[in-house]
Amino acid sequence: NAGVMQNPRHLVRRRGQEARLRCSPMKGHSHVYWYRQLPEEGLKFMVYLQKENIIDESGMPKERFSAEFPKEGPSILRIQQVVRGDSAAYFCASSPIQPSQGTGRGETQYFGPGTRLLVL
Amino acid sequence: SQKIEQNSEALNIQEGKTATLTCNYTNYSPAYLQWYRQDPGRGPVFLLLIRENEKEKRKERLKVTFDTTLKQSLFHITASQPADSATYLCALAASGGSYIPTFGRGTSLIVHP
């Protein structure tokens, strides 16, 4: 039973280039979450998606960042015109159902290994 | 503003002792709280969830308490082992909204043989 898969594991980009990070959730999971982790900081929520829908993007920067989770294929986090401050580890997590008040299976998030983005 | 605080200093203990990690929060009406483990270079791994109306949860050598009056959760690892060395993250989900948890910065635990 494969876990959450992310690729690439490491990505190097020059300032101004685009970065595309991919996430394949666990089998049977249709809910995907993206987080960013900076050194010495906690995981910061970015966006929550279901298939073909963005449910909560309250943590996404207003510009340059976008996310999608198409009907077929992995979820994509896209960063346009990267800057040095975008250098971080980006984690994807998945769950089988949506989270609620702690009564079901939706609260446990299964994380991928992360993509380490370095902007030169 | 809402805050989740974990001790930023690493906790160093001897093998066999009980490790206790603390998570404090402010300005939250919690629905549930979780603890995750994160090893260097890897994604977090879920350990335990405790709901706002629960006082204590146990799983093997792990125990979590949740005091909504003190606004604090304690995470205990009994009979600690060097393999328990990792960073432990507290995550809190507020009532209402999308119930997506907010993570603390984590506390590093180092268990010495």
Image: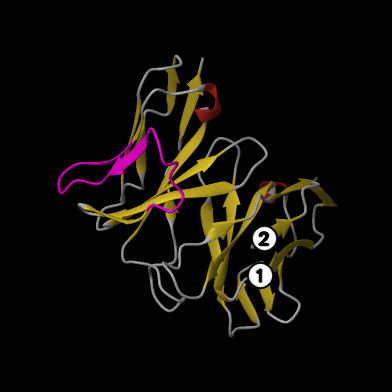
Task: Please give the chain letter of the residue carrying mark 1.
Answer: B
Task: Please give the chain letter of the residue carrying mark 2.
Answer: B
Q: Could you tell me which residue is drawn at 79 percent across and 46 percent down?
A: B10
Q: Which residue is mark 2?
A: B3
Residue A71 in picture, x, y percent from top left: 15, 49
Answer few, some or many: residues within 10 Å of disc 2's Cα (few below 14, many 20 plus, some between 14 and 19).
Answer: some
Answer few, some or many: residues within 10 Å of disc 1's Cα (few below 14, many 20 plus, some between 14 and 19).
Answer: few
Left or right of B23: which side holds A94?
left
Bounds of the magenta span? A57-77
Say which amino acid is labelled 1. Answer: Asn
Let me know if marks 2 and 1 both belong to one chain. yes
Note whether B87 is above or below A7 in the view shown.
below
Point out which mark residue B27 bears: 1
Task: Look at the image and tell me whether residue B76 can be seen.
Answer: no
Task: Look at the image and tell me whether residue B63 can be seen.
Answer: yes
Say which amino acid is labelled 2. Answer: Lys
Residue B84 in picture, x, y percent from top left: 68, 51
Residue A79 in picture, x, y percent from top left: 38, 30
Could you tell me how far apart the alpha carbons at marks 2 and 1 are, in whole angstroms?
Answer: 7 Å
What element does badge 2 sit on?
Answer: strand
| Of the image marks 2 and 1, the number of the one nearer the N terminus | 2
Q: Quadrant of residue A11?
A: top left
Residue A53 in picture, x, y percent from top left: 24, 54
Judged by its main secondary structure, the magenta piece is loop
What element does badge 1 sit on?
Answer: loop
Note whether A58 is above or below B101 in the view shown.
above
Q: Could you tell me which residue is drawn at 51 percent across and 35 percent down?
A: A89
Q: Could you tell me which residue is drawn at 48 percent across and 29 percent down?
A: A116
Q: Quadrant of residue B56?
A: bottom right
